[in-house]
Image: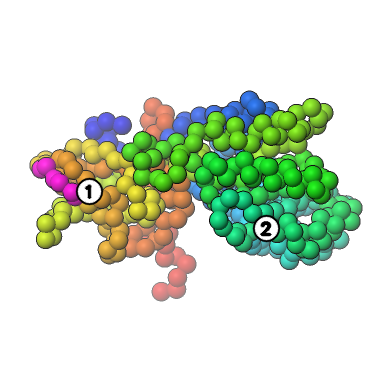
Amino acid sequence: MNQSQLSVLSAKYGSAFYLLDTQQFKENFSELKSAFATIYPNTNIAYSYKTNYIPALCKIVDELGGLAEVVSDMELNIARRVGVTPKNIIWNGPYKNPQEFETLLVEGGQVNLDSFYETELLKTIAKNHPEKILNVGVRVNFAINDNTVSRFGFDVESKEFFDTLSAINQLDNVKLLGIQCHYATRRLETWRPRAEKMLELLNQIGIVPPRIDLGGGLYGKIHESLKKQFDAYIPTYQEYAQEVAPLFAEKFGSMPNPPQLLIEPGSALVGDCMSFVAKVVSIKNIRGQYFATLLGSSHNINISGKNPPLTVYPLANERFEYDNLNFVGYTCIESDVLYRGFNGLLGVGDFVEFANAGSYSVVLKPPFILPNFPVLDISGDNPVLIKRQECFDDIFRTYSF
Ligand SMILES: Cc1ncc(COP(=O)(O)O)c(C=O)c1O
C-alpha cells in the first residue's frame, strides 16, 4: 500500500478501515498444512472460526479442503451460510444449544463432548434417531507443562470420562470419530507433550479414532519488532510440525488407514492477514506527553499492551517531529492506547497502519462508543468491500426506544 492508494481508499471508505489480505491467508493455510503433511500426510486443518469469522475467510478454508471448527450455534450458522457440508464441521466448546446439537449430529457433523451433561444429552438424541449414525468426539483434558488447570473437556482420570467412552460404545448408532485437546498456550515446548500424552491416552484406552485433534494454540507470522516484545520464542510452522508430526508418523505411518491428525489454528493463519488503518484526528501535549488521537481504538486491534508494527502514511499538510508520542483511541478510556513511545514525523491528517491485527480483533470489537469500521480485501487488483461500515441501526435495532 502506498500513500496515494491509501488516500483513494480513504476518499471512498472513510477515515478508518481494516485491510485484509486473503491471498496471504491462503498461503498461510497451505504452508501450515504442508509443514505437517510432509511429515504425516494425513493431516488437516480445522480453522477456528472464533479467531476471525469473516465469511470470506471461512469460505477459503472450505475451498482449500479444511474443516470448520465452531464453538456456538452462531458460528455453526456461519459455516452453514458459507456452504460448509456438515461432515466438515466440528463443534467444540463448553455450551451447545441442545436443539442445534441434535441437528448437527443428525446432519452428520462432529460434536465434541465437553462435559457429562452432554453425554446425557447424546443418549437422548441417539434414542430419538435410531436410523442415523451420529459422529461424536470427546475433548480430553490432561496436564501438560503450561501451569494451568484448564476447565475444558473431560479429566482423563475421571469416572465421567470412562463413563462417556462406555456410553458411546454402548450406543449402536454413535461413532467415536475424534479425540480432541486444546491448550491456549502457544509455546513450542508444549506441543510435544500434547502429542505424547494424547498418544499415551489412546494406548491406554485402546482406541485409535479416525481423527486425533491437537487443537490450536500456535503463533503465526509476527513482524520482528513485535516478536521482540514476547517473552516466548516465536516458532515457525515447521518447528511446530517437527514437535508432533514425527510421533504420528512413527506410530501410525504403516497403518493402511491411519488416523487423521487435526490442528485447529486461528491466530497462526489469520494474525498477519489483517491490518488496521486509522486517521490522526488531533495531536496534543499534556505536561510534556504527546498524544495523537486516532479514529481507531485499541479495541480494533486487540494487541494487549504491546506495540504493534506501525507504518505512518504522510497525508497531512503540516508535519512535525515528535518524541515519545502515544497513539490513543477515540474512546473515553484512559488505557485506550494503540502504541506507546512513537518517535518521528507526524501530522493531523496522516494515516497510521497497525499490522498483525487479524486475530481476535473484529470478533472482539464491542459496540462501545462507535460501531465498527469496514473491511477491505486488498489482495486483488482492486479493493473488495468484505464488510461495510457498521451504522447506528446495526447496533440499536435490537433495543426498544
Ligand atoms: C478449542 C479451540 N481450538 C482452537 C482455538 C484457536 O486458538 P489459536 O488462535 O491460539 O490458534 C481456540 C482458541 O481459544 C480454541 O478454544
For residue 382, above or below residue 388 = above
The C terminus, quarter of image: bottom left
Near mark 1 (Cα within 10 A), the count class, few <14, some 14-19 or many ≥20, is: some
Is residue 77 among the parts visible in the rendering? no
Q: Which residues are magenta?
A: 320-325
- The majority secondary structure of the magenta stretch comes to strand
Is residue 237 among the parts visible in the rendering? yes
Q: Position of residue 299 (x, y in %)?
A: 37, 55
Q: Which mark is residue 153?
A: 2
Q: Amino acid at mark 1?
A: Gly
- Asked if residue 341 lies in the magenta stretch, the reply is no
The N terminus, quarter of image: top left
Query: Foreground residue, 366 or 191?
Result: 191
Q: Position of residue 157 (x, y in %)?
A: 74, 59
Q: How many numbered callouts?
A: 2
| Image quadrant where residue 124 sits | bottom right
| Image quadrant where residue 20 sits | top left
Q: Amino acid at mark 2?
A: Gly
Q: Position of residue 222 (x, y in %)?
A: 41, 38
What residue sits 24% from the left and 32% below the top?
A: 4
State whether label 2 is within 8 Å of ligand 1.
Answer: no
Q: Is residue 110 left or right of residue 12?
A: right
For residue 1, above or below residue 318 = above
For residue 401, above or below residue 378 = below
Near mark 2 (Cα within 10 A), the count class, few <14, some 14-19 or many ≥20, is: many
- Asked if residue 321 lies in the magenta stretch, the reply is yes
Query: Foreground residue, 192 or 257?
Result: 192
Q: Which mark is residue 34?
A: none
> Disc 1 marks which residue?
341
Q: Which of the two labelled residues, at mark 1 and mark 2, occupies the earlier sequence position?
A: 2
What residue sits 55% from the left and 30% below the top?
A: 238
